[in-house]
Amino acid sequence: MTSLLDSATQNLDRNGYLDLDVDPTLDLVEEINRLKKEKNAVILAHYYQESEIQDIADYIGDSLGLSQQAAATEADIIVFAGVHFMAETAKMLSPSKKVLLPDLKAGCSLADSCPPHLFRKFKEKYPDHVVVSYINCTAELKTLTDICCTSTNAVQIIESIPEDRKIIFAPDKNLGAYLEKKTGREMVIWNGACMVHEIFSHERIVKLKNRHPNAKFIAHPECEAHILEMADYIGSTTGLLKYTIHDPATEFIVATEAGILHQMEKASPNKTFIPAPPNNNCACNDCPHMKRNTMEKLYLCMKYELPEIILPEWVIKEGVASIDRMLEISAKAGLVSK
Ligand code: 13P
Ligand code: SF4
C-alpha cells in the first residue's frame, strides 16, 4: 500500500510541492527552527516572500546578496525561500549541497520569457557580441551567457565590458533600456519582462503623488521607462530599502513587489510606505510565483528534504562561469549586498 508521503512524492512534479496535511496545532516557527538546527540548514529568503517567512529566515536579501550567501554558506542544506531561478543559482554555486525549494512551481515570468532554445538561435545572429543576462533567467540560459548581473551590479557589469565590444542583454527589456540610458551603451535587447513590474499605472501614480506631495517615489529598474521617469530613486530591492532608511522623507510610494514593504516598515516604523498602484484593482504587485511559498510548504520541505533542486552536471559546469564572473566583478567594485 502506498503511504501518503509516497503518493505526495510521486505527485511532486505535478503539484510542485509536497501536498500533505500539516497539523494545524503545530507551532511552525518552533518546528522550522528545530529542523534548521537538526539538519544544519540555512534559510535564504528574498524580500518578496511573505512576512512570516522573512521573519524566520537566516538571511533576507536581493538577488546579489542571496547568491553571495549561497556561495559562502557552510550549512549542509540551503532552503531557498524564493523562486526557481534563485534556487538553481544557489545549486550552481554550491553543487555539493542539498538545495531545497518549498514549491518547484515558484517560477518567474521574466525567466520564462526567454526560452533557451529560442535564445540560442537569437544569439547566433550576433556571434561577436558579449552576452549579459539578468540573473532572473533559467540555469540553461546561464550556459549561453558570458556574464550574469543583478539589479544591484548591472551598471558595473556593463561598464566592465570594453567599449569596443558589442553586447546582447537578456531577458529584461525594461532593465536593458534603463542600462542603455545609464551607461550610454547601445545593446541588442531580448524582449522579456516581469509581470509584476509591468503592471504599474502612470496615471494612478501621478494622482497618488498629487495626494501625497511630500512622498518620494521610488522604483525598481524592472519597471517600464515611463514609470522610471517619474522616480526620485531607482534601485534594486536592497537599494530601495537603504534609500528609505537614509532619506529624510517620511512618506514613500514604492513601485516594486509589495513584500519589500515588510522590511521597510520594520527598519523605519515611523515612516509611511504606500505600494504603487497597478493599472487595475487587483493585488497585482504581489508576485504570484514568490507567494507560492508558504510556512506550511517551508516546514514540509525541511522535514522531508523535498522538493530538491537537481541540475544536470553540464548545466552547472557551463552555467556557473557566468555567475562567478559576476561575483568577481562585484567584489572588485566593493558591491556586497547586505
Ligand atoms: P532584486 O531583489 O535583486 O532587486 O530583484 C528583484 C526581483 O524581481 C527578483 O525576482
Ligand atoms: Fe520574476 Fe517578477 Fe516575480 Fe521577480 S517579481 S520573481 S522578476 S515575476
Image (cartoon, rainbow, N blue to C red):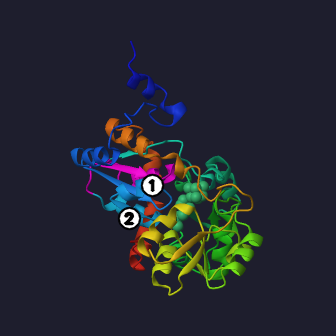
Q: Quadrant of residue 51?
A: bottom left
Q: From the viewer's side, name the closer residue of 314 and 248.
A: 248
Amino acid carrying mark 1 in the image: Thr
> Mark 2: is the Cβ under 8 angstroms from ligand 1?
no
Question: Which residue sits at x=60%, y=53%?
Answer: 111
Specify the segment rendered in magenta. 74-97
Give the quarter of the figure containing the C terminus. Answer: bottom left
Side (left or right) of 57 relative to 181: left
Whether residue 49 sits left or right of residue 68 in the image: it is right
| Residue 77 counted in the magenta span | yes
Q: Are marks 2 and 1 in contact (CB under 8 Å)?
A: no
Mark 2 and mark 1 lie on one chain; the one further toward the N terminus is: 2
Give residue 144's quadrant in the image.
Answer: bottom right
**Which disc number belongs to residue 206?**
none
Provide the secondary structure element on which disc 1 rests: helix
Q: Residue 68 carries which label?
A: 2
Percent of width and height locating residue 303: 32, 38
Check mark 1 vs ligand 1: CB closer than 8 Å? yes or no. no
The residue most toward the bottom is 248
Vertical placement of 126 versus 36: above or below?
below
- Farthest-out residue, right: 203
Residue for badge 1: 89
Residue 120 vs residue 44, the one in the foreground: 44
Quadrant holding the N terminus: top left
